């Protein structure tokens, strides 16, 4: 999974908005390496899910 961190002291408001729009608008590529990572996360969620 991805997170976006923006430093308020080094990034202006307009650039921050542009970065957030690009981040939120990004699409899952479906590449094999990304699917493997997603499956690992799903396995962890299933293993530690509260009953």
Image: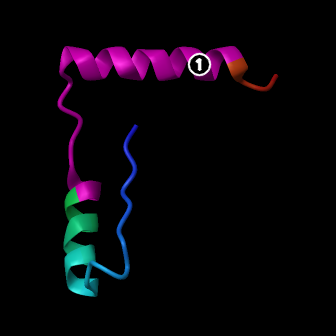
Answer left or right for 18 relative to 20: left
Q: Give residue 39's quadrant in the image.
A: top left
Please give the range of residues in magenta. Answer: 23-47
Q: Is residue 10 above or below residue 4?
A: below
Q: Position of residue 51 (x, y in %)?
A: 82, 22
Q: Position of residue 45 (x, y in %)?
A: 61, 23
Q: Is residue 47 above or below residue 38?
A: above
Answer left or right for 25 relative to 47: left
Q: Which residue is mark 1?
A: 44
Residue drawn at (30%, 18%) of the image: 35
Q: Position of residue 24 (x, y in %)?
A: 29, 57
Residue drawn at (67%, 14%) of the image: 47
Answer left or right for 5 relative to 30: right
Answer left or right for 14 relative to 39: left
Point out the image quarter for the N terminus.
Answer: top left
Query: Number of labelled discs?
Result: 1
Residue drawn at (23%, 35%) of the image: 28
Name the outermost residue toward the right: 51
Q: For residue 45: magenta?
A: yes
Q: For residue 48: magenta?
A: no
Dominant secondary structure (helix, strand or loop) of the stretch shown in magenta: helix
Q: Is residue 32 above or below residue 29?
A: above
Element marked by disc 1: helix
Q: Position of residue 38 (x, y in %)?
A: 39, 22
Residue drawn at (25%, 17%) of the image: 33
Colour mapping used in the image: rainbow
Q: Is residue 51 above or below residue 26?
A: above
Q: Residues within 10 Å of mark 1 (few under 14, many from 20)?
A: few
């Amino acid at each position: 999974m991805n997170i976006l961190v923006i430093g308020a002291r080094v990034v202006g408001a307009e650039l921050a908005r542009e970065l957030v729009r690009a981040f939120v608008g990004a699409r899952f590529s479906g590449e094999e390496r990304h699917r493997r990572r997603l499956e690992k996360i799903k396995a962890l969620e299933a293993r530690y899910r509260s009953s």
